[in-house]
Image: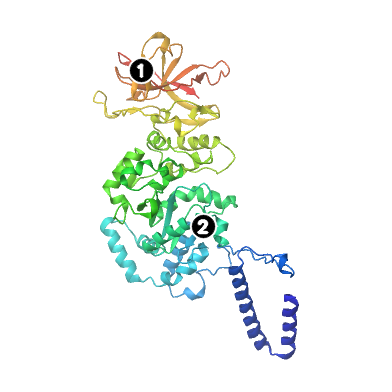
Amino acid sequence: MGNFFEDLVHQVMEATMEEDDQRALKAKFAKLRGEVINDVRDIFPHGQITPPTLGIRGIKVRLPPKNPNDPDVPDISGPSIAAGIPEVINIFNAYAQNELPTYLIHVPDKRLVGRNEVKRLFRKEIASITEEAIHSRLVELNESCPTAEREDAIRDIIKNTVKYAVFSHRWLDKGEPTFYDILKSFRPYGYEKLVKFCEKASEYGCRLAWSDTCCINKDSSTELEEAIRSMFKWYRDAYICIAYLADTTSIDDLHEDVWFTRGWTLQELLAPRRMKFYGRDWIPLTSDVNDKENMELMAALSRATRIPLDDLRHFQPGTNNVHQKMMWASTRTTTRIEDVAYSLIGIFDVTMMIAYGEGKRSFHRLMEAIIHKCDEWQIFAWAGASSSDSAAFPDSPRCYLPLDPVDSNDARLPSTVWRGDRNIIMTKRGLQMQVLLVDLSLQEATVYEKVGTTDVRTDAYSNYSAGVVDYWCYDASGDGILQPEQEHLCVLLRPDARNPYASWWKVTTTNLVTIRTEDKLRRTLTTVFL
């Protein structure tokens, strides 16, 4: 009926009006039609069927919610922003399209906006950036960083203009608002928590906010993968991270909060430069603007997580200190098995394909990505179940165990020494590495198991060989050295009759195994494939 009426009006207009008048009236009709559709969408966000008990024919409203990343949203590159500085506009466009999260919450009205919409929302402020403001910011940056350039100043102004807050919290068992809940204006039980988060974000001057429950379109594998791979960076670049510890009442009982047991909250703790912690009922735990500057709270966080203060405050991602970082993750759990690995991608600054459904193989692939960039022997300080794809890798971070610190600048050795194989690589035959082999049946060394914090001497492994991974090297001769009465970490090996190419098979142990020798032992290194 609606289409018939509209066609009839158009026919009357064409028969009785000039072309210019027709265009003007059609434009008014189009505007009115759009306003009516938006009004209906607001009233019936899900569509509605009239109950038959009313005695009238049912009417079903089918108005799908708008996509916040709809390309029809006006872009900033239009003529209305021509007054802005072209260089600033270009940098802002690149920043919004490549560095901002795919979707954000527009804090004032709690609706999702995409990158194009963000451009539109901030285009006037970006266009008003002046040369004087750029010069002033560059002078400020040069005081702390003499190498800062004009582009750095422009980016700094843009980031401070288009600032957003991120949310760190423990998910409810049910009721967390989803991507489509927010699109359809539905308000589940957890919506009030989202509103509180937005209120706190607004207090920090953020008109944009990001929450993992509702700002990721999980129906799109492409968008989900981008979110998981970019999440660490999004938390790092956020103006403030709002952390809600629902079980905490004060700094004293902070360590009991379930927030510390979740896998994803580890990167949410390490990545942000600025954080604000709230306890139960949204009571702030400190009076500071940035809780990473509060030493009392940071000390409590360090005790709860066993993460050093410097890492809590100024963490740098990368494949250094792999053993230590795996220890931080070893007590945490995730709902999906794959998230054990995916939640660590940003912390180790590696990249890998996201493939839900692969199970524990995801952690094996994470270890492969790490080993390509890591040259630390401590990566082998684990025990227990190995990956089904390689005996060289554990099946989860829980396999990593405490290791006594080792002084790598031993006074008895030249300062140019190195320790362990620094060229470990993955091959088709397995993990290739050089070890110093010690036949334990010859009783050249004393074997210990690390049970908790205690070293327990054992003879249970006398039928195996020890592949020492932290031997000393001080020249390019191809020899390794074990220092007398010094603890050396090893993997237990036995001949592999089933695989003559690999030669050795790694033996599974419950605890870490170390050896000590009474005399200095020098031996040619052996290449093994695990």
56 left or right of 380 in image: right
Which sits in the foreground, 204 or 163? Answer: 204
Classify 442 as above or below 426. Answer: above
- In screen coordinates, is 107 left or right of 456? right
Q: Position of residue 259 (x, y in %)?
A: 42, 44
Instruction: Say what secondary structure mark 1 lies in.
Output: strand
- Viewer-closest of 368 and 234: 234
Residue at position x 37%, y 62% in the image: 203
Residue 22 vs residue 178: left or right? right
Q: Quadrant of residue 389?
A: top right
Determine which residue is flagged by label 1.
Answer: 456
* Mark linked to residue 507: none
| Res 102 label | 2
Task: Give the residue type that dot 1 points to.
Answer: Val
Residue 312 sits in quarter: top left
Residue at 44% x, 69% y is 86
Q: Earlier in the sequence, mark 2 or mark 1?
A: 2
- Name the element at disc 2: loop
What residue sits 62% from the left and 75% below the top? 36
Q: Position of residue 10 (x, y in %)?
A: 72, 83
Q: Is residue 226 above or below residue 430?
A: below
Q: For the residues carrying marks 2 and 1, which lies nearer the camera in this image?
A: 1
Q: Would residue 307 be seen by someone viewing this image from the given angle?
A: no
User: What is the residue that sits farthest to the top in this orientation?
Assistant: 442
Q: Residues within 10 Å of mark 2 (few under 14, many from 20)?
A: many
Of the 4 image quadrants, the one containing the N terminus is bottom right
Badge 1: how crowded within 10 Å, few (<14), some, or many (20+)? few
Q: Position of residue 67 (x, y in %)?
A: 58, 62
- Disc 2 marks a residue whose amino acid type is Thr
User: In the image shown, does 39 or 127 lie closer to the viewer?
Assistant: 39
Q: Residue at x 74, y 86 (%)?
A: 12
